[in-house]
Amino acid sequence: MLPLLPAAGSAAAADGEGIQRQQWGLKAIHASDAWKTTRGKGITVAVLDTGVDPSHPDLKGAVHGGKDFLGMGAKKGDRAWARHGTAMAGIIAGHGHGKGRKLGVLGVAPDARILPVRVLLEDSDPKRKEARDQRPTALAAGIRWAADKGADVINLSLGDDSSSAHPEPGEDAAVRYAQRKGAVVVASAGNGGEEGDHVSYPAAYPGVVAVTAVDRRGARASFSTRRWYATVAAPGKQVLIADPDRHYYEGWGTSAASAFASGAVALVRAAHPDLSPAQIKDLISDTARHTPEGGRSDALGTGVVDPAAAIEMGTNIKPRKQQPSQPPYRSEFFGTGPDDGPSAGWLATMAAVLGLLLIGGAVAVHKGVSLETLRGARSRLPRG
């Protein structure tokens, strides 16, 4: 997990007064310009995280259904319950509260719906270590479940960017499955910018919108991981977040950046529902602002996400059948690619081999030759 930690002494008034005036992130991505077209109505964003508090004033009525893939850890009312997930949901689809909804936090897509999927526990949860071993299975199952439930966007403000991080075949296959079902998968790029810039998964899986973090000045946040898979950047430092305790805090992390980008994607999907996930990813990338010299960088991708610009450009894009935005891995470790099954070419090859074996079978038996099953070598990507 890539934690979004509250900054010491940054708690605001419990009623959230004045919070929206301090939400610099919304201004940084020109959210209000996008709201002239849509505020995300009709779009469902699955938040795979520590859970979401559906009774929070800024999210009440926006959280629908959900599922817990862990079945352990803190419960509602415990301090170590749904803090990170609620914060991410608020960034994505918070709608404020009170008269005129002027109190609390506003999300990037305030009219979008949140589908909470619990796949990990808070760092402070006593069961955290026990649940960690379940993470690959829970995350893969959660991604598939969210896709089956019709999620338009899947936010993954989480990941493994440790020195031992490595791709998990089940997660990779689940991401591809979700993309084929029409969901845009967004993930945090990693918080290892000061600790070796290790590769983070699921951000590094093909087709994922991987998001790095910037500060108020639009500069890369020092903790933000720099890697080849960076798609775009978004606010991720000194971001105001909602908490189940009904207070508001200032936090940091590419987790927050991912949530900002997921909200932006929700707006683009609402405006252009017929575009494929690959087309949405391209739009988000092609219309980013503050583009680095040369067109992109490992630190910022193609620049800071701008949903209004993406919505405008999307009017000129003709919808096409969903295709993977990157070619599938050819390694056995990553499975068989987008079809989750043997390809036609593989079947033809096997048919030819079996034919030869049948023809030569009598000769082989006569000569006492035994045939052994050939096994492909299991290969992995180098670890980050």
Image (cartoon, rainbow, N blue to C red):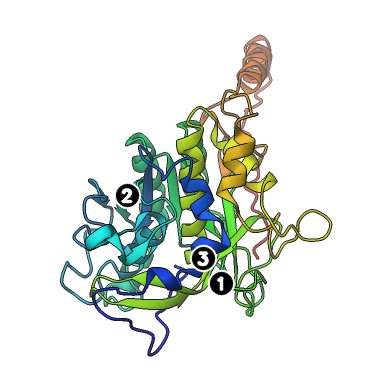
The answer for how far apart the CA atoms under marks 2 and 3 are is 20 Å
Q: In this view, does 38 lie to the left or right of 339?
A: left
Please report the residue visible at 53 percent of the width from the left and 67 percent of the height from the top: 254
Measured as percent of width and height from the top left, residue 192 is found at 60, 73
Q: Earlier in the sequence, mark 2 or mark 3?
A: 3
Q: In this view, does 339 lie to the left or right of 4?
A: right
What residue is shown with label 3? 25
Instruction: Say whether residue 129 is visible.
Output: yes
User: In what quadrant of the picture does the N terminus appear?
Assistant: bottom left
Q: Circle 1 sits in a helix, a strand or a loop, which is it?
A: loop
Q: In the rendered image, which quarter is residue 14 located in?
A: bottom left
What residue is shown with label 1? 191
What residue is shown with label 2? 114
In depth, the one of 44 and 208 nearer the eye is 44
Q: In the rendered image, which quarter is residue 126 located in?
A: bottom left
Kindly indicate whether the residue at mark 1 contacts the one at mark 2 (C-beta within 8 angstroms): no
Measured as percent of width and height from the top left, residue 122 is found at 33, 71
